[in-house]
Amino acid sequence: MTEAEAAPRRLRRRRRFRRQLRSRIILAFVLLGFGLTALFAWATNYTRTRVENQLVEDVMNSNIDAYADKYYSAPGQTPGIDFQQMVGRVVKRENFETLRYEQPDWYELGDGIHNISGTNPDGSPFAYKLAVRKTPNEWFFLAYDMTQSVRGEKQFNRAIYGSVLVFTLLSLLVGWWAASRVMSPVSELATRLKESGSSSRPDQLASHFPDDEVGQLAEALDDYSARLTDVVQRDREFNADVSHELRTPLAVVKGAVELLLSAPDLDDKTRSRLLRIQRAEAQCTDLISALLLLSRNERGHGATDVGRLAEQLLDAHRAQIAGKPLELRIEGRSELVVDAPEAAVSVALGNLIGNAVKYTKRGEVIVRLLPESVEVIDSGPGLSAEDAAKLFERGYRGTHAGHSQGGGIGLSIVRRLCDLYGWSVRVTPGEVEGVVATLSFHTR
C-alpha cells in the first residue's frame, strides 16, 4: 500500500477515535485531572509566594525600625544586625550626594519595601528586598538577601510542574480504566446485538445484563426488536398471501387466454387483444415474483439469457406502440447469462425499456447488448440535472412525465432489485439527445 493510500485510512481511524465514547471519557478524565492539578498548583504557588513575601516584609518593617532605634541610642556607631541574610546601612545628610553616585537605585527609592534584582559582574543573579526609612538627617537601609529564596522558589516550581505532569498521567490511566469498565457492557451489548441479527427471531439481550442503565437499554432494544420482528413477519405473510391470491386469478386468466387463442376461427382483431392480455398477465406474474423476492430480501436463482429476454421485451413493446413513429431495435450479441430468476431480470430491464418507449414520441429506442451490461438508448426529451439526481427515488416522476400514467415506482423497484442482486443501474443524458440507461450485471 502506498503512502497516499495509507494516509486517508489513518485519517479515518483518527476521526473514528475522536468520535468514540471511550475516547471522550478518557479525554474528560485527562482534562479534569490536568485542570484540577494545575489549578491546585497555581493556588499553592500563589499562596506560598504571598505568605512568604508578607512574612519577610513584616520582619523587615519591624527590624528597620529597631535598626533606627539602635542608631539613635548610640549616635555615631553603626548598629549591628542580629539576623542572617540582612545588611544595614545608615547614610547621613552630608553623604546623600555620595549615595547618588554609589547607589543611584537606592537614592531614588522612597520609604517602604522594595524588590531589587539583577546580575553580578561575574554573571550570577542576585535578588534582595530593601527596606527604606528616610528622615531629614539620616537615611536607613536594610537589605534582606532573597537569592536563596529565589533558588528555592524555582525548585518548588519544578516540583509543582512535575506533580501536574504525574497527576495528569495518573488521570489518563484512571480514565482509561474507567472507560474500559464503563464501555465493556456497552461493547458486549453491541456485539450481542450484531450476532442476534443472523436469525429470524433475535435472542433476548436483557437477560445477559444487570438491572442498570445498560440493562434498561437492552430491555428497550428487546422490546423494539420484538415489535419490529412482528411487523416484518406480518409484512412477509401479507406479501406471501397477496402473491398467492394474485397468482390464482392470473393463472385463470392465462389459461383462458391460451384456450381462446387456440380457437381456429379467431379473427385478427380479437387475437391482437388476447395477445395483449397475455403479455399483461406475464408482466404481472413477473412483477409479483420480483416484489415477493424484495419483500423477503432473498435472492432467487436461475439462468436467465439476457439477450433472448431483451428480444422478447422488444417484441412485446412493438405490439403496443400503436402506429407510433418509433423504431425498436437491438444491437450487438451477448452470451451473458445471469444467475437470477427471469422474472427479476425482466422487471429490471423491462422498466428501462418501457420508460424509453413511453417518453420517446418519435425516433428510435436501441437496446445495446454488451458483455456484462445492457444499454437502453432513446431519442426522447432528455434528462435534466434534477431528474438525474432523483430519478430512482420512490414516487418521483420526472419533469418530462407530463400527464402520463404511472406512480413513479418503476425505477425505484429497479434500484431495489439492483441492491438485492449486486447489480448497478445508472441513467445519463445522451451524447446529442435522449437518455442512456445502463443496467450492469457484474457483481459489485
Image (spheres, rainbow, N blue to C red):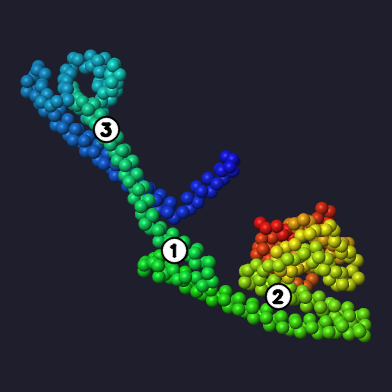
Count every numbered label the image shows and give the total: 3
Mark sitting on residue 189: 1
Mark sitting on residue 288: 2
Q: Could you say where residue 246 lies in the image, as x and y percent from the top left?
A: 70, 81
Q: Specify which label sits upstream in the sequence, 1 or 3.
A: 3
Q: On the image, numbered disc 3 is attached to which residue?
A: 155
Give the structural element (helix, strand or loop) at label 3. helix
What kind of residue is marked 1? Answer: Leu
Q: Residue at x 40, y 61 (%)?
A: 185
Give the structural element (helix, strand or loop) at label 2. helix
Q: Residue at x 25, y 22 (%)?
A: 106
Which of the 4 image quadrants contains residue 182? bottom left
| Cα distance in 3D space between marks 1 and 3 | 51 Å
Residue 351 visible:
no
Q: Residue at x 73, y 66 (%)?
A: 303
Position of residue 192 relative to residue 90, above or below, is: below
Compare residues 14 and 146 and report the one nearer the observer. 14
| Cα distance in 3D space between marks 2 and 1 | 39 Å
Compare residues 435 and 152 and report the one nearer the observer. 435
Residue 293 visible:
yes
Position of residue 398 relative to residue 28, above or below, is: below
Tags 2 and 1 touching, CB below 8 Å: no
Q: Could you say where residue 298 lies in the image, as x and y percent from the top left?
A: 63, 68
The label nearer to you, 1 versus 3, is 1
Give the structural element (helix, strand or loop) at label 1. helix
What kind of residue is marked 2? Answer: Ile
Label 2 crowd (10 A; few <14 / some 14-19 / many >=20): many
Q: Could you say where residue 357 lies in the image, as x and y percent from the top left?
A: 83, 66
Label 1 crowd (10 A; few <14 / some 14-19 / many >=20): many
Which of the 4 image quadrants contains residue 21? bottom left
Position of residue 394 relative to residue 33, above or below, is: below
